[in-house]
Image: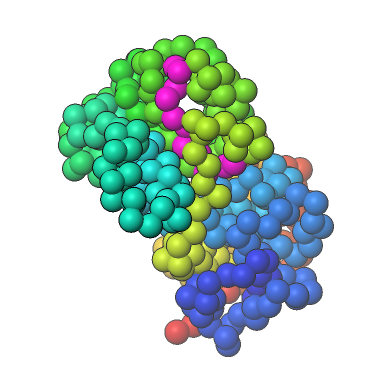
Amino acid sequence: MFKIQTINNISPRGLELFPRDRYEVADSISNPDAILVRSADLHCVEIPHTVTAIARAGAGYNNIPVAACSERGMVVFNTPGGNANAVKELTIAALLIASRNILGGIAWAASLLDKAGEVPELVEREKARFEGPELRGKVLGVVGLGAIGVMVANDAVDLGMEVMGYDPYISVDAAWNLSRQVLRADTLEGLLARADYVTLHLPLIDATRGLLDAEKCGYLKQGARIINLARGGLVNEGDILAALGSGQVATYVTDFPSAALLACPKAICIPHLGASTPEAEDNCAVMAVRQLMDFLETGAIKNAVNFPRCTLDQRSLHRIVVVNRNIPNMVGQITTILAAGNINILDLINHHQNEYAYNIIDTAHRIPEATLERIKAVEGIIRVRTIEKVRS
């Protein structure tokens, strides 16, 4: 019986996938095997030593202490693409409200409530105050071509925009899904110099923090419009406010309000609604649950942020998974110990990512506890787990 601790409200569409005969699921549970979380901050939470995996029902994972989890051999999953359509749709809306002064017009129209019969005449007289350019024919720069960026780029092409994309690390899957009409920018600076609109779709890591700063804003066309529904920290707030003040940036639409941005009339602040749709919550929960179940029952890793993708068709009832530091001769030591215990290896896969490695090993027989202890004692081994195949 696997124990799953839920933190935050997780969509029932995901939770109902756990077979009740093999899984115990609760928000308060002792010695859980895994944690399922949405946005709760786990940095100050004491994570039990029994936890082998944490699944984030969402794409971002800043709320999880990934480095500390890696050191303990805990796999951290996210759900890239699960909320992609929701964020894409809000990005299209952001392009429109950045371009046409729709919000200003609506607010002004609401102020006419007490004007009674004057309303039609006032509307016709004042509507020019709220005009703005169309999207068709304008250049959109998409920075980051993951699941969301690709969808935004493709839909912007359908809107008649000229779309440029920049992502030096674009995946093969993303490249296959990207419209052929999307132009490739060789540099971020080149994209910024040509774009009428720029939308950011990047993770927040050390390399991207404050990416759009005063220097980068200097490459923009006068009056460019910026959309940031990814992470607030991708933009240097002081620099973007200065660019708004000078007119270098005409409008900044963000999903991450602050007091300073709320006070700026050229900033449009959305209250973090990017993934706030029931469909996105369902998709992310389903994806997170399936990844957890696959990991717990087979050891397979898909969409982990701290360990490599690693899957192996199971050829035996008996499997061992090993997390270790990525140093020489680790596989050799593990297989030598198994051989000394007279354990026949039927299949094996080893993948590494940065300083960590992950092994899945199928054996002909159940591994004795003494042999497991010898493997655990090897310097560089972080975690060892045995899996017995679920009989259908």
Q: Position of residue 119 (x, y in %)?
A: 34, 51
Height in image: 238 above or below 350?
above
Q: Position of residue 23 (x, y in %)?
A: 61, 80
Horizontal side of 384 relative to 179 (left or right) equals right
For the magenta stretch, what is the residue range? 247-257
Give yes or no for residue 256 being in the magenta stretch: yes
Q: Which residue is painted at 57% across and 42% down in the image?
A: 256
Q: Residue at x 77, y 71 (%)?
A: 31
Query: In this image, 179 relative to 225: left or right?
Result: left
**Would residue 45 be found to the left or right of residue 348 on screen?**
right
Viewer-proximal residue, 160 or 56? 160
> In the current view of this chain or complex, which residue is farthest to the front?
117
Which image quadrant: the N terminus?
bottom right
Q: Quadrant of the C terminus?
A: bottom left
Q: Residue at x 57, y 24 (%)?
A: 241
* Quarter of the rendering containing residue 167: top left
Q: Position of residue 293 (x, y in %)?
A: 53, 69
